[in-house]
Image (cartoon, rainbow, N blue to C red):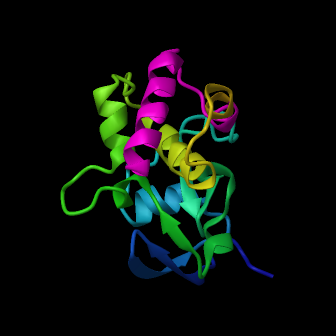
Amino acid sequence: MIRPGETTKIRVKVNGIWYEKEVEPRLLLVHFLRDELGLTGTKIGCDTSTCGACTILLNGKAIKSCTYLAVQADGAEITTIEGLAKDSKLHPIQEAFKDNFALQCGFCTAGMIMQTYYLLKENPSPSEEEIREGLHGNICRCTGYQNIIKAVKDASMRMRQ
């Protein structure tokens, strides 16, 4: 039985770098990423997995890190928005969001991009309906979905070239 204040060691690979940290078993993965590793691109929106602002990739699958414990990620490979750009060059999805004015206020953007990454990995050429279905768990409070849909279509084309 773990008592309050006790910690357990976890080891995770985040954006290509292995980290080994002592964490409280109740620590949420989103707080681990933001507070322990300083990766603040992942946002905390609702704490109920409704909005998707905290979406990351865990072992290649999109998850909402606000309802996932850090200890559950022990041994996992995680990709956050900080891990997409390479050598100071934006990922094609990030470029497409920028070029299609899909950034809005920016709060949901990291989660939208990570969900888009997963969507395009699973379906490189989605229809508009498939895009809407693929992003239905991510909320844009600016209601800018049309430009987000355009960005996903654009990213799909860029990634297939």
Where 123 falls versus 140 (above or below)?
below
Q: Which residue lies furthest to the right in this view?
A: 1
Verify whether residue 17 appears in magenta: no
Name the residue furthest left. 88
Quarter-of-image position of residue 70: bottom right
Please say whether residue 54 is visible from this viewpoint: no
Q: Where is residue 115 in the image (x, y as percent from the top left)?
A: 56, 45
> In the image, what residue occupies the spot 61% across and 63% down?
27
Question: How far across and how far down the image is residue 95, in percent?
Answer: 30, 40
Identify the residue at horizontal 55%, vertical 35% (top origin).
45
Q: Which quadrant holds residue 132?
A: top right
- Please state if 127 lies on the left or on the right of 84 as rendered: right
Q: Give the range drawn in magenta.
A: 133-161
Q: Position of residue 103 (x, y in %)?
A: 37, 28
Identify the image quadrant of the N terminus. bottom right
Nearer the observer, 36 or 142: 142
Is residue 158 covered in magenta? yes
Q: Is the magenta stretch mostly helix, strand or loop?
A: helix
Q: Which residue is drawn at 60% across and 70% down?
A: 59
